[in-house]
Amino acid sequence: MTIRVAVAGATGKLGSVAAGLIERTPGFELVAAMNSSSSLDEMLGSAGHRTDVVIDATAPAASAAIVDFAIEHGVNALVGTSGWSADRIAALGRSLASHPERGVVIIPNFSLGSALASAFASVAGRFFDSIEIVEAHGAAKVDSPSGTAVRTAELITAARGGRGPVQAQHTDQRARGQQVASIPVHSLRMQGVVASQRVLFGGPGEVLTVAHDTIDPRAYEAGIVLAARAAASTRGVTVGLDKLIDLGIGDPDHAAAPVVEDGVE
């Protein structure tokens, strides 16, 4: 079965990777490569080439409209755009309740290594109370914190369960970063960077760092193909590449009780 795909934001960094990958990967057909001037109707394909999945690789301000249009017109969506907070995802879930035959997959980061790092961080978060995230992306990235950092923070806090919020001192000071699910997140936007994240865990006499660096957009390719296949048949909302692979960790539903339970670029 061929999966017909439209890519919104096909001229951007992630979108161009996705469009090229879909074109050359067996089992997929690229039916539309859309840019900022394209009509949303283009994502639907044409007679005999009806779109199965739209890949949203646009910008936070445009993403919701693309997903809403896809759902209303019978197309599943794969979202690679930042800006989908827990509240926004919850609202999407409520919207999909009236469209049970449709599904949306939201992937804050298509890198397998990034998914593993976030999962490892969620495990470590059960053992430490002092936790901060430092993430870096290229100077052109307009939003912060990154979807990956938000997802990581939400996974950590969910895994902590009854342990409660982390210890974050002096959060009234702007230099202390933005709190996401109680965890301070510090965002760097600078030339020479593709994508990088450090999650630091502090305890008496020690610091643990879970780090991941993307050095080439090829890191996203396996995740894009995996997620696009999943998006074609998904129902409801699925968040995170970790939900599509068998990690056995990183999912709050599988987290053990605390010992001594929080998305090219």
Image (spheres, grey):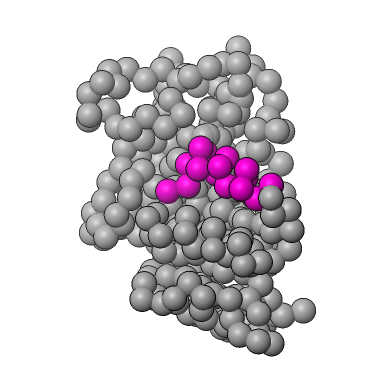
Which residue does the image show at 52% across and 38% down from the upper left?
Answer: 86
- Residue depicted at x 41% and y 17%: 167
Q: Is residue 233 above or below residue 205?
A: below
Name, please, the residue furthest toward the right.
1
x and y percent of residue 120 in the render?
57, 38
Q: Identify which residue, 90 or 18, lies in the foreground.
A: 90
Assign the magenta stretch its main secondary structure.
Answer: helix
Q: Which region is colored magenta?
A: 83-97
Q: Nearer the viewer, residue 126 or 57?
A: 57
Image quadrant assignment for residue 50: bottom right
The C terminus: image quadrant: bottom left
Q: Is residue 133 left or right of residue 108?
A: left
Q: Residue at x 38, y 69 (%)?
A: 13
**Image: 260 above or below 8:** above
Given residues 47 and 232, the one toward you in this image is 47
Give the image location of residue 111, x and y in percent. 52, 57
Establish if 222 lies above or below 127. below
